[in-house]
Amino acid sequence: MLKDFNFIPTKEIISIIDGVSTGLGDDTKQILQKENIDIRYSNSKKDLKWDLLHRNIRQNLVGSHIMAEFAKVPGWKILPLFDTVEGNLYLLMKEYRFNNILKTRKKRTKDHYMEELVKTFNMGLEDFQQISFVENDTLPAEVSKVISGILSDISLEKDLIKRFAIILFDDLNDELVSMRCCILDSNFNIVHQENWSQYIKHNDSIITEKVEPEESLPSMLSNLDLTEKAKRKIGQSEKNAEKKSADNDKKQSHNN
């Protein structure tokens, strides 16, 4: 355990959790409903969740000593959090993504930005009785271009950052179910962590999902701007179906 590492205070932890929880749930549902998008067929739901939870966290942390500024990494926008009192940098990530990064480490030729952050700010955290298995030629001789870009985006000098920690969360059915904060050593072992799940409020959603039942879909045709030819074709099909049903009833009556 790291005795010299102080995690984010409880008040700010709750602000982060509330931002994530609302972004994953009600905020996303509300926007999709406003735009009349069926949540079952949404392509934007995943990215929209991240946009909203990032927005919520920034708003919730206004006036606190936790700085939240956007930064760009290849193909994605992230929201690093910096504790201006303790000097620690935090990053938010889903549990499954974190596990996938660790599982594929040996297969990849290029480090993920999370790995670069660990190597840059958490060197020396290994147990002194344990030999580090990070090869010398993989250690960053200088801050990488990606890390330099992150620091530039959030207007921080490298020397101001003491340690890096990652905030991991998991959700189920659009509800936040777990969150923890972990510190990794350069072997990517968790050397210190804190469970934040105790602060999660499991409230019922105030937004009711409106999903069209499958059997109501044909009736939607009446609201469409159909051509006369299409209308005649639909009407003819309905008449044929009615005639076929009547013929079957007559045949069955005759056989009885």
Image (cartoon, rainbow, N blue to C red):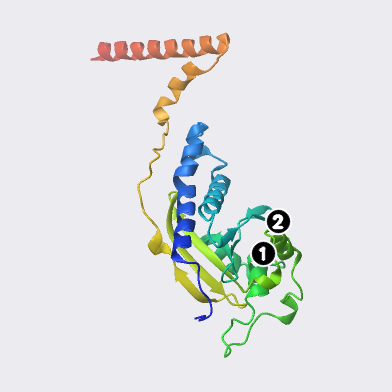
Q: Which residue is mark 1?
A: 113
Q: Which residue is mark 2?
A: 74
Q: In which quadrant will I find the C terminus? A: top left
Q: Which sits in the foreground, 114 or 51?
A: 51
Most distant residue in the front direction? 63
N-terminal of the pair, mark 1 or mark 2, is 2
Left or right placement of residue 219 versus residue 110 in this view = left
Q: Residue at x 40, y 39 (%)?
A: 207
Could you tell me if the residues under marks 1 and 2 are in contact, i.e. CB atoms within 8 Å?
A: yes
Residue type beneath disc 1: Tyr
What's the distance in space between the residues labelled 1 and 2, CA to CA?
9 Å
Q: Residue at x 41, y 63 (%)?
A: 197
Q: Which sits in the foreground, 202 or 234?
A: 202
Percent from the top left, x then y, of residue 146? Answer: 72, 62
Left or right placement of residue 129 versus residue 120 in this view = left
Instruction: Give the structural element (helix, strand or loop) at label 1.
Output: helix
Residue type beneath disc 2: Pro
